[in-house]
Image: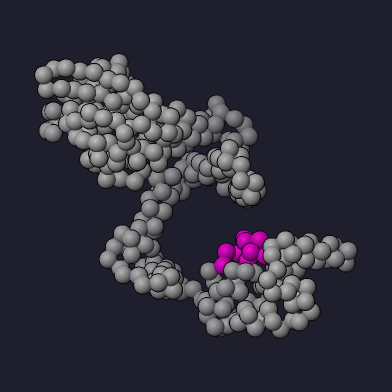
Amino acid sequence: MTICNQMEAAAAAAQIVGIDLHEGIQIIGAARLAGRHHPPFDLGLPALVLAITDVPTAQSVGAVLGNAYPEDHPLQLIYLKGNGTRSARVLPLADLASSAGVDEGACLYVPALHHSSYADLQEVMAHLRAPYGCPWDREQTLASIRTYLLDEVAETLEAMDSEDEAHIAEELGDVLGIVAMIAQIATEEGRFQMADAVRLSVEKLIRRHPHVFGEDDIDDIEHLYTRWEEIKAEERAAQDRPARGPLDAVPAALPALRKARAMQSKADQAGLLDRVALAESSPELEDLLPEGCDEKTLGLLLWRLVALANARGLDGEDALRAFIGRWRAENTP
C-alpha cells in the first residue's frame, strides 16, 4: 500500500468511526504491528491499524495488542471495499483472532486507553512538580525520594506475597509513580530524562541477550551465566570503569539477609566459599534446620532468633550487615 493509499484509507476509516485525524491519532500498518511483541505506540491515544490482509494477520495483531490492552477493549473492524462499500463493526479484542471475512481492505480502530500510558503518568508528575502544582511534590529531591522508593518496593513485595492481582497492580503503579518523580526531578536539574533511562535499559537488555537478539549459541544455563559476566566486564571496560572483584557486584543497599545470600553465591562462584561445607560445619544448626525442612520451619527459626537477639539488646539486621562487611574485607582477593 503506497503512502497515498494509506492516507486515503486512514481518512476513510476515521470518517466511518467518527474521529477527527487533526485531533491526533496513531497510524500503523498491520504487517509492522504483527511483527512486534508489544504495541509501539502511546496507549493514551487512539490508533488505526491499516491493511489487515487476512485472518492470520488479524490473529497476530490481536496477540500484540493483547500485551497492552484488556481482552474486552472495544475495537472497530472497518471494511473498505474497492467498490466504495464501507462498514464497521464493534468487537472486543478477544474476538479479533476469530473474526471472519477479513480481507485486504480491512482496518482496525483501537480506542485510547485513558490514563493508562506512561506518557500520562509523566504528564501528571510534571504537572505536580510545576510552579502551580503540589507543594509536597515540588519540594522533593533525589535525596528525599530514596526512602519512598524503598517503601513502595517493599509494599509491592508484600502485595505479591498476597497474590492479590488488583493490589499488586496498585502498588506497582506507586513504584512507577516514584520512578516518574525521579525522572522528572532529574529532567528539571538537567541530569537526564526518562528517555535516557529507557534507552539505556533497552540497549542493555539487547546487549546482554546476544543469544536472543544476536548470534550467540548458548548451550546451557552455566554458559549463559558465564557469558553474562563477560558482557558486564566488557561494558565496564568500554565505560573506562575499574574492573569489579568477585564480591563487588552485590548492592550495598540490599537487606542484610538478602545481601548475605547474594554474597555467599558470589563467593561460591569465585571459589572463596563452599556454602555446603559452611552449612554443615555447625551441627547444632543442622539439628535446628534438618534436611528436608520447609520455609515454615526456617521462618520460625529466624523469628525466634530475632526474638532472642532483641532480648539481648541486639539488632539482627545491623549485626548481619556488619559481619558481611568484615567478612568481605577479610576475603577480598
Position of the N terminus, as image quadrant, is top left
Residue lying at the far right in this picture: please name it. 311
Residue 223 left/right relative to 215: right
Dividing the picture into quadrants, the one containing residue 134 is: top right
Residue 91 left/right relative to 148: left
Tell me the chief SS of the magenta region: loop
Residue 79, how many percent across, how many down?
22, 23
Residue shown at 63%/66% (left/top)? 259
Q: Is residue 251 covered in magenta?
A: yes
Q: Is residue 8 visible?
A: yes
Residue shown at 79%/79% (left/top)? 284
The relative height of residue 138 versus residue 206 in the rendered view (above or below) is: above
Tally of numbered discs = 0
Residue 92, how many percent across, how many down?
38, 28
Residue shown at 62%/31% (left/top)? 135
**Figure colour scheme:** one colour
Residue shown at 43%/44% (left/top)? 194
The relative height of residue 205 versus residue 237 in the rendered view (above or below) is: above
Q: Is residue 140 visible?
A: no
Position of the C terminus, as image quadrant, is bottom right
Q: Is residue 27 covered in magenta?
A: no
Residue 265, how many percent across, how many down?
57, 73
The relative height of residue 274 versus residue 307 in the rendered view (above or below) is: below
Magenta region: 250-259
